[in-house]
Amino acid sequence: MFNRITLTSLFSLLMLFGCSKPHEPTINLARAVHVGDIDQLERNLYWNADVNKAGADGLTPLHVAAQKGSLVMSKILVKHGADLEAVDPQGHTPLLKALITRNTILAADLVRSGAKLDPDAALHETAKLGSADRDVIDFLVKQGASLDNSDENGNTPLHSAILNDQRVVAKYLINRGTSLGAVNHVGLTPLALAIERKNPDIERILRQFGALENR
């Protein structure tokens, strides 16, 4: 009898503890995500913090989680209604932020959660910013990106990489099979553009792979 009463009392205490409200947060939601504090994140969400409120840097909590590569925080925020299409001052969504920081696992999870993606535009942006490594390029190609898609100026992602002196990205794109003879709206091939920009490292790589200077 004693054991039964003791177990019943213990169970009641556990239930009471489990159903109690979490303490109010001691830091705000933006700070919680920045420092990676999941407990404070969940407290903020329980106490109805605005899940889409941007910080002084213009980043929403989901942007920050994506930028930091926190898959757990990203999942929690999405579950609580984080806006998948919110844009930061640079026009980047959380999904694009994840790709810029080369976190394709988190990016894939955001896609599964319903985040929209323009794979061609994302390939240009990551090429421009130097983020298009093998994994990012492969991810975007699987999402439908064309290595030789052209932007409003007729530049391919390889042109975009060269315009921003992204030598490593240029090499990744070349190794992946991008066209070396594509011509943009002002008639420049990737090699001609590298010469115009006086970038001997990229010029050398292009020549090694058989690129022609002809416009």
Image (cartoon, rainbow, N blue to C red):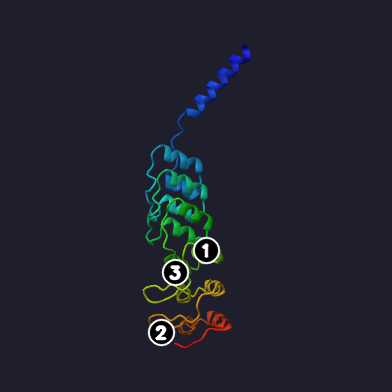
Which mark sits nearer the N-terminus, 2 or 3? 3
Residue 168 vertical position relative to residue 97 in the rendered view, above or below = below
Q: Which quarter of the picture shows residue 119?
A: bottom left
Could you say where residue 150 lies in the image, as x and y percent from the top left?
Answer: 41, 74
Residue 136 numbered tag:
1
Q: Image point 46% across, 72% down: which residue?
A: 157
Q: Badge 2 local density, few (<14 within 10 Å), some, or many (20+)?
A: few
Which mark sits nearer the N-terminus, 1 or 2? 1
Q: Image point 56% across, 18% down: which residue?
A: 9
The number of numbered badges drawn on the structure is 3
Residue 71 vertical position relative to residue 40 in the rendered view, above or below = below
Residue 189 vertical position relative to residue 166 in the rendered view, above or below = below
Could you say where residue 76 lies in the image, as x and y percent from the top left?
Answer: 47, 44
- 207 or 40, nearer to the observer: 207
Q: Badge 3 local density, few (<14 within 10 Å), some, or many (20+)?
A: many
Q: Return the residue at label 3.
A: 124
Which residue is outermost to the bottom? 214
Cα–Cα span, label 2 and label 3: 19 Å
Instruction: Give the secondary structure at mark 1.
Output: helix
Q: Return the residue at label 2.
A: 187
